[in-house]
Image: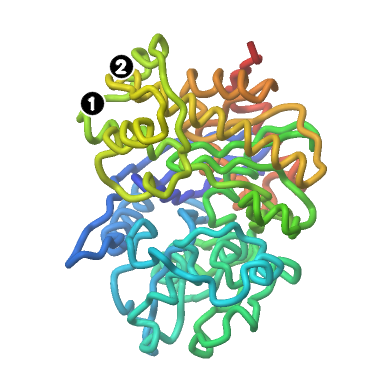
Amino acid sequence: MRVTVAAVDLGASSGRVVRGLAGDGALAIEEVHRFPNGPVRLRGTLHWDVLGLYREVLAGLRRAGEIDSIGIDSWAVDYGLLDERGALLGNPVHYRDARTDGIIPPIDPDRLYRLNGLQFQPFNTMFQLAAEPLLAHAAQLLLIPDLLSYWLTGERGAEYTNATTTGLIDVRSGQWSAELARGLPPGLLPDLRQPGDPAGEHEGVPVTAVGSHDTASAVVAVPAEGEAFAYISCGTWSLVGVELTAPVLTAESRAANFTNEGGVDGTIRYLRNVMGLWLLQECLRCWDTELEPVLRAAAGARGSVFDPNDPVFLPPGDMPARIQRWCREAGERVPETPGEIARSIVDSLALAHRDAVVAAQRLSGKEVAVVHVVGGGSRNELLCQLTADACGLPVIAGPAEATALGNVLVQARAAGAVPGALGELRALVRETQPLRRYLPR
């Protein structure tokens, strides 16, 4: 049995609709529609153009042709608020907006971590809600994939893996926390769905809940053999961690800024957010140039090391100047050319990857024998090699399209076209997708 599905995959800088074929030992995807996804600043606030995204999703679904299912994944934490009639109250605010600057957790940080297991990120949904002027008028909150699914089907729900990024889920029970949701309007948080659950129909085609946090989908498609692996879902962010069966909620884990997010099949994505290729993307935007010539220059350049997770690098802006200023103030050699700045970025990311992999092993007690790099960053040969060198472990790079593949696999499994266990899904990825191995030097 084979199925053909549409995977809607929305990233922080672009979105696309992918047509996927799965079953009978086959797994293949074809991008049928790609579109930009940029923030819009309106009267001092950074928004997402969610209506424009919905228009592009509809265009992509038309181009996908005859399909058996639809699944949607996106970035985490951002949301739309609906009024009592189900109408959108305002364009969703971008997580890089400054409205949560200086936010203070509503309860003791140790207690908060024991409840939701999340690293402190000022843009987590619970902190955005503390700064939300429309909250008093809201009847329900839908995260971005759930909002688009609602517009397609008329049915509302909250997919579990993405809901765990809000800070409002009890990480032990996997349910909304009454303590953390205290003060929110009654009924604001919709019923939870699990990956693979039905989510309605669009023009007669089933919509299936997938791992709607894009990292949850990407981790499904990590081509790991066995359990002794770390993963780096590398794109705008680098999500660096290990897969566990239970959360790690120690004070040491909180101090190391590790997060426990829900994964597919009841797993825990125990990881640390690293600023990722956002740094390089913003530099390329400032330089108005392409990636490849900059990486060629970086390969032979001398870089400096900086902390990619410094909050100064979170907002959009003149990233090259910020990196130079950071190095200057820290007493590091100041990179001058685009090649030197790009080399500084990949060197610093590789070391941040190593630090996260080492810490994840120490804090979770899980041994790592190989690091899997998936997502767009798996195409960056310099970064993959430097990550292998820094970690002292083999790096297996690919698939670059892990998020779309994971989305397709969960839909295909729900339809009965592919085997059930995560290990079997990953074996299918290994057998069908191109991978590249980097050995530490």
In the displayed orientation, state which residue is furthest to the left.
43
Nearest the viewer among 161 and 117 is: 117
Instruction: State how the image is colored.
Output: rainbow
Nearest the viewer among 119 and 217 is: 119
Quarter occupied by the N terminus: top right
* Residue 92 seen in the figure: yes
The CA distance from mark 1 to mark 2 is 8 Å
Q: Are marks 1 and 2 in contact (CB under 8 Å)?
A: yes
Task: Tell me residue 192's x, y (percent).
Answer: 61, 73
Quarter of the image for residue 194 reads bottom right
244 vs 366: above or below: below
Task: Tell me residue 14's x, y (percent).
Answer: 34, 45
Instruction: Tell me the number on the disc at residue 289.
Output: 1
Task: Tell me residue 176's x, y (percent).
Answer: 64, 76
Q: Secondary structure at mark 2?
A: helix
Quarter of the image for residue 438 reads top right
Mark 1 is surrounded, within 10 Å at the Cα level, by few (under 14), some (14 to 19) or many (20 or more) other residues, namely: few
Instruction: Look at label 2 and name its amino acid.
Output: Pro
Nearest the viewer among 422 and 271 is: 271
Residue at left 64%, top 47%? 271
Quarter occupied by the C terminus: top right
> Which residue has dot 2 on it?
293
Q: Secondary structure at mark 1?
A: loop
257 vs 169: above or below: above
Residue at left 30%, top 45%? 35
Residue at left 56%, top 34%? 352
Residue at left 50%, top 83%? 188
